[in-house]
Amino acid sequence: MKNKTVVVGMSGGVDSSVAACLLKSQGYDVIGVTMQIWQEEDPSHTELDGGCCGLSAVNDARRVAHQLDIPYYVMNFRGEFQKAVIDYFVREYREGRTPNPCIACNRYVKWESLLRKSLAIGADYIATGHYAKIRRLANGRYTICRSDSLCKDQSYALYNLTQEQLARTLFPLGEYEKAKVREMAEQAGLQVAHKPDSQEICFVPDGDYASFIERETGEPEQPGNFIDLDGRVLGQHKGISHYTVGQRKGLGIAFGEPVFVVRVCPDTNEVVLGKGTDVYTDHLRAHMVNYMAAGHFEEGQEVTAKIRYNHGGASAVIRSVGKDFFELFFKEPVRAVTPGQAVVLYDEENVLGGGTIVS
């Protein structure tokens, strides 16, 4: 669609760079933007801790924008990121849940804040390098669809976007495999064609969540008891932020057989351990529901449910629906249903919606 303006969120990686390149070739007026989210002023910290939005990301994105001959800006989203992502991340772990900061960042920073600023400067759309597609259904609603590249599909992490956000969003990479995207970057002469993908949470690059939480709060982790399913004390844990449902490694406690985290109990500061079979369940309850393909769920509706980003999906039936919750029963037990994570419901390739797991 020519003569439309699109702001592309550029992380300095190959995906967002090719997204900008494709949109320009399709006739859009493209503006490149990198979101400044790092909290530190010290360049050594912003380089290490900025992840996909650190100083190296800015430098790479700026070079790509220069090559593509498009305007480029760095926009300050520090406050939004602190409130919507970091504060949420810390609070969830301290309350015994396992958060998904990328989903929060997508909804409240990359879309809500970036879209608002983009529309304010006269843009018609925003775009990213996510591997997903947007489809408008016969009922008039927009939905996210699985990417053609199933191994890179990112529809799970986008389930919480609103109808208004989807109507103003473009995903140029939804029809491509990763190898093809790198090939297009090479053909366009982009220097980031072979840049590795970022893997860790951008603000905790070393993966030590508990230490990050201690630094953020200024409060040390409080040790507590490991207990079994009958309440017997088995030993002492280092603090509940170190643990998540289904975890086996790093428990710091030895038994004659493998043990797993079954439940995290913030009220009593206890971590419940059990056998591998104890981390399976055939049901869950979710709240904070976002509807996508339809405005509601139906009791008895059969769906495919993903309970974490790298979960392949499992057949399930919606058994109970309330104002802002639903209960789901799986046809076969699933492993490690984790409070705080998202459960996303699909009808074939379309995202019906989802919510945050409570239990």
Image: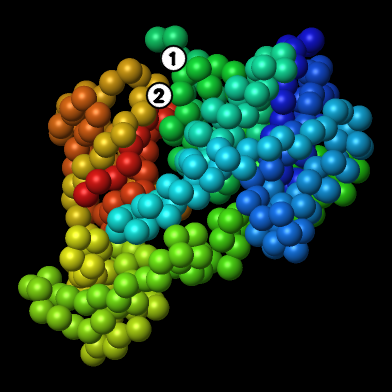
Residue 10: mark: none
- Residue kind at label 1, given as amino acid type: Arg
| N-term-proximal mark, 2 vs 1 | 1
Q: Are marks 2 and 1 in contact (CB under 8 Å)?
A: yes
Q: Is residue 244 visible?
A: yes
Point out residue 301 in the picture as x, y percentages from the top left corner: 22, 28
Q: Residue placed farthest to the left in the image?
A: 230
**In the shown orientation, is residue 99 left or right of residue 235?**
right
Residue 279 higher or lower than 177, as above or below: below
- Residue 2 relative to residue 88: left or right: right
Q: Is residue 221 above or below residue 216?
A: below
**Residue type beneath disc 2:** Met
- The label on residue 292 is 2
Give the x, y percent position of residue 50: 67, 54
One can see residue 197 in this view: no
Tag 1 secondary structure:
loop
- Above or below, 271 against 344 in this view is below
Q: Residue at x 28, y 21 (%)?
A: 296
Tell me the residue at 15%/32% (across/down): 320
Q: Residues within 10 Å of mark 2 (few under 14, many from 20)?
A: many
Q: Position of residue 323 (x, y in %)?
A: 21, 25
Image quadrant where residue 73 sits: top right
Q: Position of residue 217 (x, y in %)?
A: 45, 60
Quadrant position of the N terminus in the picture: top right
In the image, 236 versus 324, the foreground residue is: 236
Q: Quadrant of residue 26?
A: top right
Residue 111 lies left or right of residue 72; in this view the side is left
Q: Name the residue carrying label 1.
A: 141
Picture quadrant of residue 61: top right
Given residues 352 and 315, the one toward you in this image is: 352
